[in-house]
Image (cartoon, rainbow, N blue to C red):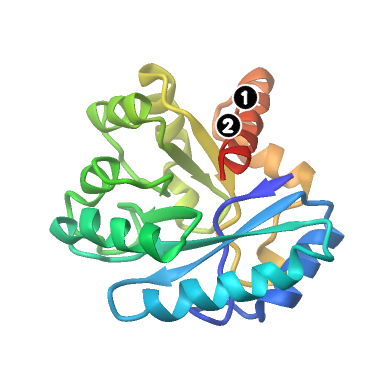
Amino acid sequence: MIDLHSHTFFSDGALVPSEHVRRFEQLGYTAVAITDHADASNIHILIPNLLKVAKTLNAVNSTRLIVGVELTHVPPPHIRDLAAECRALGAQIIVVHGETPVEPVAPGTNRAALEADVDLLAHPGFITLEEAELAASRNILVELSGRKGHSLTNGHVVQMARRAGAPMAINADGHAPGDFLSAAMAEKVGLGAGLSKEEYLQVRKNMRSLVEKV
């Protein structure tokens, strides 16, 4: 099991990174990315501190901590440069908060993210076929979300990603222990969105491939 999108109390989550990773370890995860909400105001705080704690935790834990950020409500014209700055600071995975149907994300965010150096477009809402094709061409994962509200368009995301051949991921977008997905629940998120069992297994492979690249 791998989760590429989660939050600690460095943004709006409940736990310090050490407990956060420990709880994923108890669920049998091999890797978890901490991707706290970020913009230009806090990337210089988040990334160095997570790199520091990851170095200590990864020396002793069986669950690998991957250092990331989730660029959140960043104006679309700024996403490319901010993503590059995050990468330069050492972020191992860059997530962009997509155009979920339950938040006022600026139109154009999905496309701006897919044109930048990012790894995952989170809960992309009513992603268009053209955007899904761009994700496929750039090998950027599009997310099926386990989070309430964000998950409303999972079925649409599957349809667009399937038509375009875009790689998908399933993440909890967990903010507290009750949000974290068991293996059985992660599979339900995928199959409930319309994935076949074979497609679900491919999603897991997609996520492993990104972790291996990191």
Q: Nearer the viewer, mark 1 or mark 2?
A: 2
Looking at the rendered structure, the secondary structure element under dot 2 is helix
Residue designated by label 1: 202
Numbered marks: total: 2
Q: Is residue 102 above or below residue 207?
A: below
Question: Where does the image place residue 34, in percent across and percent down from the top left?
Answer: 57, 64
Instruction: From the viewer's perspective, tell me whether residue 18 is left or right of residue 171.
Output: right
Question: Where does the image place residue 199, in percent across and percent down from the top left?
Answer: 61, 22
Residue 111 figure quarter: top left
The residue under the point 43% across, 39% down is 142
Could you give the CA–CA distance between mark 1 and mark 2, rounded to whole angstroms? Answer: 6 Å
Residue 44 figure quarter: bottom left
Quadrant position of the N terminus in the picture: top right
Quadrant position of the C terminus in the picture: top right
Q: Amino acid at mark 1?
A: Gln
Q: Nearer the viewer, residue 150 or 96?
A: 96
Residue designated by label 2: 206
Q: Amino acid at mark 2?
A: Asn
